[in-house]
Image (cartoon, coloured by chain):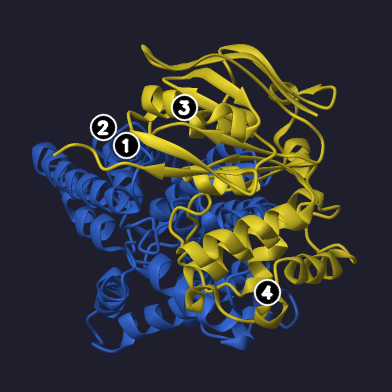
Chain colours: A blue, B yellow
Amino acid sequence: MWTVVAGHLGLTEPSVPLLRDHIVWQLRLPRALGAAVVGAGLAVTGAVMQTVTRNSLADPYLLGVSSGAALGAVGVIVLGLAHGVAALTAGAFLGALLAFGVVVALAGGSSPTRVVLAGVAIGQLCAAVTSFVVIWAAEPHATQSITFWLSGSLARVDWTALAWASATLAATLGVVLLKARALNAFAFGEEAAASLGVDVGRVRWLLLVTTALLTAVLVAISGAIGFVGLIIPHAVRFLTGPDHRRVLPVVALAGAIFLVWVDTAARTVFEPRELPVGVLTAILGVPAFAFLLRRGGTR
Amino acid sequence: MLDIDDVSWSAGATRILYEVTAAVPRGSLVGLLGPNGSGKTTLVRAVAGLLRPARGRVTLGEDDVAQQPRAVIARRIALLAQHADTDLDLTVTDVVLLGRFPHRRSRWSDGSDDHEIVERALRRVDLDGLAHRKWQTLSGGERQRAQLARALAQEPELLLLDEPTNHLDIGHQLQLLSLVRRSGVTTLAALHDLNLATMFCDSVVVLDQGRVVAAGEPAKVLTPALLSDVYGVNAEILDHDGRPVIVYRRPPA
């Protein structure tokens, strides 16, 4: 593998058969890097959402943002508006924002439990509408992609998609790290944060829109992969303590490593068949979810 | 030092505050009294700059609070709420360090004197032995003292208390208010317990249905007639070494 990479970087003369070269350079490498970017992005988004909504069960998947993004992306495909990552991302972004807006409106900023209830309901609704749209369109291409959008897979990541996702991830990381101390001030709720001098409305809007945008890009390239954003932040806080200046960088790193690892497992465990990676993260994530729920995480 | 001048505020069509005028002189502890729903919490929030009065203004020193940026208000006014809780695994020091947030000079690192100020704040509320304890393991009284230390770490000109003793037993109520008194910071405190008010406040302001119905020294303001009008209770005021003590009569069954 290293020979292929070195060859492409112009370090050595290409010396590997073309097929193997193609597999490594066009399939394996973007996929592994994609897993890292998607894992890091989902985990950071989960960590930020958990703090801003004051709910330890928040993650882009549970709050319906991923499903909304998937619906937006499928909508773009079915309506035949355009192809390519940019159009998919635009559709996914609209879907993500719309879903999240409805969730926030339904929950009315009240109890953290209602945020999750609203998120689950909207997530289900988006998934149902996605199925409906796909069946109604009866387009083979769209039907084929429904599994992809709803359960998540990294098989389609190419270099263009990777570039988009990496750039969005880098920008989002920059924004959330600048707001790391403000996030710490949310520990005792919004009113307490405001009385400590945080412009709560502006910070919350900034963080939620940035993370919704990141979620949209991630869903556009990988579908809705659940539970990464839920498990990783909790595992990391267990190690680093609650200070976001430490939590956020470690969460990004841990999310990246976790998803590369899980995607490799999804690809190889049942060889030659491949599991959608979202199925595997759900299998790992649901017990973690149950554990948090039992520990009184919805308080 | 704090002047509340003709402040009105409504939630939709419901009037919560109506032409409220009151003052808190420098160094004093002023009690804000009144039954549930009389507008105490709303007034505290207006003073804290958390809501903007529809009419009138709140001035601290020379400055209109509503015109100041959030970060500036937070360096001058600290708020201690009824009840604070978190799911996060914070230590007492982490909690008190939050009080340094408005004074941050860097977006990333803590200030060099922050830890010293935090230690001093903990000593001022007699919590210096618990600096490394986890929030989740604290009793209700310790939690409120930790929040008071956080408020003092903000180094505020004005301390706002919103019924801070609601969830505490009598020993911890007395302890918390004497710590507030001992801090020497100018304080406006919404209180439920009238005997605590007569014990700790230099003066009181009584709200009823969003209006100020009486203000001044506790001994002069808290009369049987006022308590009957405002709280609908039948009470007798006893004199205990010059301090009024309120004794309630049981309502007829």
Q: Secondary structure at mark 1?
A: helix
Q: CA distance from mark 1 to mark 2?
A: 5 Å
Q: Secondary structure at mark 2?
A: loop
Which mark identifies residue A79?
2
Type of amino acid at the residue the image marks with label 1: Val
The reply to whether dot 4 and dot 3 touch (C-beta < 8 Å) is no
Q: Secondary structure at mark 3?
A: loop
Q: Residue at x 60, y 81 (%)?
A: B133
Q: CA distance from mark 4 to mark 1?
A: 59 Å
The reply to whether dot 1 and dot 2 touch (C-beta < 8 Å) is yes
Which mark identifies residue B127?
4
**Mark 4 or 1, closer to the camera:** 4
User: x, y (%) of residue A288?
Assistant: 31, 78
The reply to whether dot 4 and dot 2 touch (C-beta < 8 Å) is no
The residue that mark 3 highlights is B39
Which mark identifies residue A76?
1
| Quadrant where the image shows the N terminus of chain B | top right
Residue A92 in sight: no
